[in-house]
Amino acid sequence: LLFMSIKSPSLLKLITAFSDSQSTGKMTTLTAKDKDRVKTFWAQVSGKSEDIGSEALARMLIVYPQTKTYFAHWKDTSPNSANAKKHGITVMGGVADAVTKIDDLKAGLLSLSELHAFTLRVDPANFKILSHCILVVMANMFPEDFTPQVHVAMDKFLSALALALAEKYR
Amino acid sequence: MVEWTDFERATIADIFSKMEYEVIGPAALSRCLVVYPWTQRYFGNFGNLYNAAAIIGNPMVAKHGTTILHGLDRAVKNMDNIKSEYAELSVLHSEKLHVDPDNFKLLSDCLTIVVSAKLGKEFNGEVQAAFQKFLAVVVTSLGRQYH
């Protein structure tokens, strides 16, 4: 197999991609280019991190009302409530932290994964929902910078983040 | 039948009344082909889709993006009967084009993001909800005739 790889660079690429996808399970292996794009874009927008977080969470509660079920303990589950705003900021803080741990999200998000798995027990389908809302807000607030290339890198990053977050679920 | 509030009807009418089809259509389709590269499987004869720049600059992609976006017009004009409006197109996508219906959602997510970028502040949470509901109904209708 190795001999065949040496003869054919494209075959080697295919084998590497295959084994990468096997080890991570999904299409979430971040290339060096992806990481670079994520870090660069994040540096551009991190000043607005709190706004992005609050806005994304508010939109999630509006567009996907079933997500409000996780916040029944709030007196006020309306999107513009103080609780919602604060929580959006908290979540985005987690995303910001994940950017710094982009080279090993599984290890970096271990305790957060345990929190989500054993205490919060958020159905992982919701990670996808919130990720979508984050992307919509990024496009909304940074239309020039959120190019298709940045979009795919961020989408992959948020998918990898979600996967790391779900690591301890079962 | 799908129930639409006055706000939802007005929102959809408003968005499409000022839609720049030749800008938004190409942007949405090219974004879909970049962000979800497996969707390129349906465009084998579109020439150079080798990288993001090629996709974004590809005139066949642009033309087709505009066509697809105009495909939403019939739903905008007849929001109370979207299912029947798309019966034929659903058969086409299933029997002739053999498009996996999961792809409709991928494209609609890209369209949402492109419209979000275009409309800015105007595209608030309520507007996003209405737009996504509209697209979800179209997507379901397009998948209806698959068997």
Image (tube, rainbow, N blue to C red):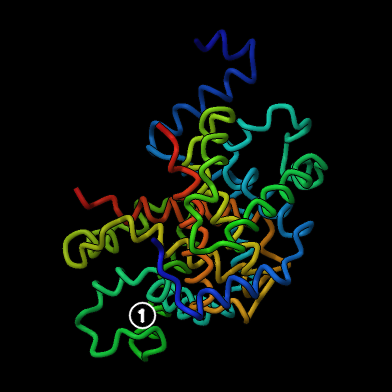
Does residue B99 appear left or right of residue A139 in this picture?
left
Against B15, is A48 above or below? below
**Dividing the picture into quarters, in which one does residue B20 lie?**
bottom right
Residue B41 at x, y percent in the picture? 61, 30
Crowding around mark 1 (Cα neighbors within 10 Å: few <14, some 14 to 19, many 20+) is: some
Q: Chain of mark 1?
A: A
Type of amino acid at the residue the image marks with label 1: His
| Image point (36%, 83%), residue name | A84
Against B146, is B26 above or below? below
Q: Secondary structure at mark 1?
A: helix
**Dividing the picture into quarters, in which one does residue A48 lie?**
bottom right
| Image point (40%, 61%), residue name | A129
Residue A111 visible in the displayed image: yes
Against B82, is B18 above or below? below
Residue at image mark 1: A87
| Image point (30%, 68%), residue name | A66
Is B82 or A21 nearer to us in this picture?
Answer: B82
| Image point (21%, 59%), residue name | A117
Residue A93 visible in the displayed image: no
